Amino acid sequence: MTDLQKSIKEIAQKLGITLTYYPEKSKPTDVPVCEKTFEGVTDDGSYTFFRFTFKGVGYIGAIEGVGEVERNYAALLPTYIESFNERENELSKTEFLKKILLGECSSMGVYKYATKFSVRGSSCFALVLRVPKMMEETLAVIEQYGGNSLDTAVQMGDDTCVLVKFIDKTDNEYQSSVDYAEFLAQSLKEELGLDVEVGVGPTVRELRDIALSYARAENALRYADVFGMNERVHSYRKYIMVKLLEDIPEHKLNEYLSDLTDENFREVFEDDEMLSTAEEFLRCSLNVSETSRNLYMHRNTLLYRLDKLEKATGLNIRSFSDAVSFRVLTVIYHLLGK
């Protein structure tokens, strides 16, 4: 018997009603089915129907009878069913938070968590850490450097964990979520010798929106993989252009790339050394000295490569406008998996 079946059976017994259900957009033959489209509550003269969700899946519930009592039950049951599986007294703090991060928790469940752990009305953000080994030790260090007592780390997979950090308005030591992510990554390097990658999600006003921050932090790591970024902290904000271009149909991206590049330009894309030099230059905000230091390259060698790049592409990426154009074309190239 599934969790939903158990919940429906227990609710029906407690209320003394006949209660069945079926998934939305299905036509089962063994339970009453509503033949019309509706929102909220409706009936067919014999059964009262209502909509509800359970673990993110939509269902139609059916109560035998069409009186005022049945309609009142139908109005109240969606919230009750959604929260029925939120056994916060049986879940640990991290298990409960994991459900919230995955979007598997109802609004009532999020409210209960926020109330129980005193985080109602607190802004927060998610950091997704990709940990190559020593997960238990990593979680212990994160707890040690977590900042305030509200912050909680959750293991999500064999090599992934998430820190939900709540904003302490009295703490001005870290200027941004990215600064904090850098601090945490450096702490793990010093304490455990680990090189971790961190995806940084946006700050949200309340815990109920933390699943969005978590999803965007994961996307930042995914985009970093696609573009082979040689950094340890990746903010979703860096990939706004990528997200915009990713939403364009592939045939249009191919059309843009074909129209805006020629054979010489495409040779640059296939030259890993040249491409990595250009991308590091862009990452260093067009700063020649910083790029030279990061690449352990003589300044004149770097300038030679930038000149060579300009001859091949027609773009002088030392100029901001040309650098933007080059960046757009490299993003399209990577998205197409060329």
Image (tube, rainbow, N blue to C red):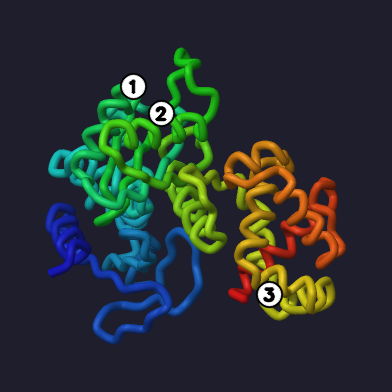
Q: Secondary structure at mark 1?
A: loop
Depth order, front residue of 85/255: 255
Mark with earlier residue (1, 2):
1
Image: 176 above or below 297: above
- Residue 229 placed where, x, y %? 54, 54
Residue beneath disc 1: 148
Residue named by callout 3: 249
In the picture, the quarter occupied by the C terminus is bottom right
Question: Most extreme residue toward the top, as rendered?
Answer: 170
- 183, above or below 29, in the image: above
Query: Is 23 located above or below residue 316 in the figure?
Result: below
Q: CA distance from mark 2 to mark 3?
A: 38 Å
Q: Residue at x 84, y 47 (%)?
A: 319
Task: State whether residue 21 appears in this view.
Answer: yes
- The image position of residue 288, as x and y in percent, is 72, 41
Write the residue at 36% across / 50% down: 130
For marks 1 and 3 on the same chain, the one whose residue lies earlier in the sequence: 1
Q: Residues within 10 Å of mark 1 (few under 14, many from 20)?
A: some
For label 2, the crowd category at 10 Å Cα-Cα, with few meaning under 14, some 14 to 19 and many 20 or more, is: many
What is the x, y in percent for residue 36? 48, 76
Question: What's the amino acid at mark 1?
Answer: Asn
Q: Residue 49, percent across and down?
A: 37, 66
The kind of residue tagged 2 is Phe
Which dot marks residue 50?
A: none
Q: Disc 2 designates what residue?
A: 166
User: Spatial distance from mark 1 to mark 2, Cα to Cα?
Assistant: 8 Å
